[in-house]
Amino acid sequence: MSDLTLILLAAGDSSRFEMNVKKQWLRIGHDPLWQYVTNRLNKTELFSNIVITAHPNEVPFMEHYSDFKIVAGGNTRQQSLLNALASVDTEYVMVSDIARACIDVTLLQQLIAHKNKADCIVPYLSVNDTVVYNGNTIDRDDVKRIQTPQLSRTTILKSALQNETDFTDESSAIVAKGGTRYFIEGHHDAHKITRLSDLSALPCLKPPSSATLTGNGFDVHAFESNKKMVLGGVTIDVDYGFKAHSDGDVAIHALIDALLGAAGLGDIGMLFPDTDPTYKDADSKALLKTTVLHLQQFGFEIVNADITIAAQTPRLAAYKAQMRTQLSRILNIPPSRMNIKATTTEHLGFVGRKEGVAVMANATLNYFNWTR
């Protein structure tokens, strides 16, 4: 059994990536980048364990994709690494960034082969251009471009990171603590994705799948007297509304479930639990906007949506066009791809007895095509 754990850092906010989608959720085939990289490195069979850090809000969603250990990250790279190290009990630990997606196995093997040379083994690239620092030309042979992954003695790395200084790599923390590091030649395939243009430098990445993903949603709400009715994002001119924790917009709730279903991201209760007082009397349009943002960040594009509202009352013919316009704007799609249908149940069931409204929704998504 290997005495080496791999930690993959994927908790960043991708603030420099220049796109709505977070880079760790770019699709390679069907897999988000973090899963693709994890599976790729796991196939090397060099590690006894793999731990992945994630933004705290993304942990439950990432757990749907993988059986690997998912740990909530912190506000900084260093805090995320500390959180992950709490789950590590092997003698050695290798740390890399999900953004280094095409690491060659030979680089990993070289790091492991030199593990007894120092407290931290560090890959680097030489600098070929002239280097000027503070107005002075310096010897470029003295300059190294540091890469990850880096391999460290676990106990020494844990101790070194217990420091108020925020280090950008493991070796700097270890050296500051009095530890040692050993440099080996790095590899250009370990190029890091920081901006969208960096994707062209990574030959191992294949385009996202062109599959169309579908989901459906269903919701019902009973009527409540003397409450404003909002349905499909539009105020309906009646003297009753819906009994609900939020504003009760049953059409939007069904639509959110359809969108999340197509994305494989759970349901509305997972994203907006009705036990959370934050969502008491919440505007469902705001919940839908948040859902759309999540889909964008997780690498999805909305293709179309279709809603069927079953209501004996109120009559909705005069409101369908407004609903279509309102919802298409929130989904960022043309009105022609946001369909609204209304029907009765011919006086059958609770809908027919005018006790409430039921809604079915369907939605289709594509993966964001970063190759464009």
Image (tube, rainbow, N blue to C red):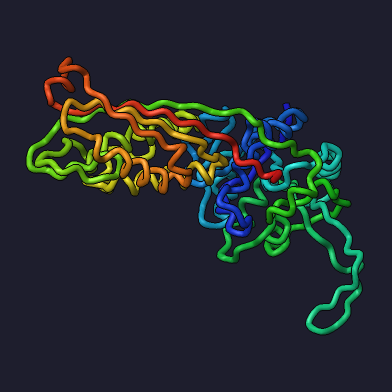
Measured as percent of width and height from the top left, residue 142 is found at 88, 69
To which quarter of the image does residue 136 belong?
A: bottom right
Q: Is residue 11 left or right of residue 139?
A: left
Q: Residue furthest top?
A: 348
Task: Report if residue 38 is visible in the image.
Answer: no
Q: Please state which of residues 125 and 218 is positioned toward the viewer in this rendering.
A: 218
Measured as percent of width and height from the top left, residue 205 is found at 75, 39
For the N terminus, which image quadrant?
Answer: top right
Residue 130 higher or lower than 119, as above or below = below
Q: Residue furthest bottom?
A: 135
Q: Please state which of residues 291 and 48 is positioned toward the viewer in this rendering.
A: 291
Q: Residue at x 26, y 47 (%)?
A: 282
Q: Please state which of residues 134 and 201 is positioned toward the viewer in this rendering.
A: 201
To which quarter of the image does residue 114 belong?
A: top right
To which quarter of the image does residue 107 belong?
A: top right
Measured as percent of width and height from the top left, residue 220 is found at 24, 27
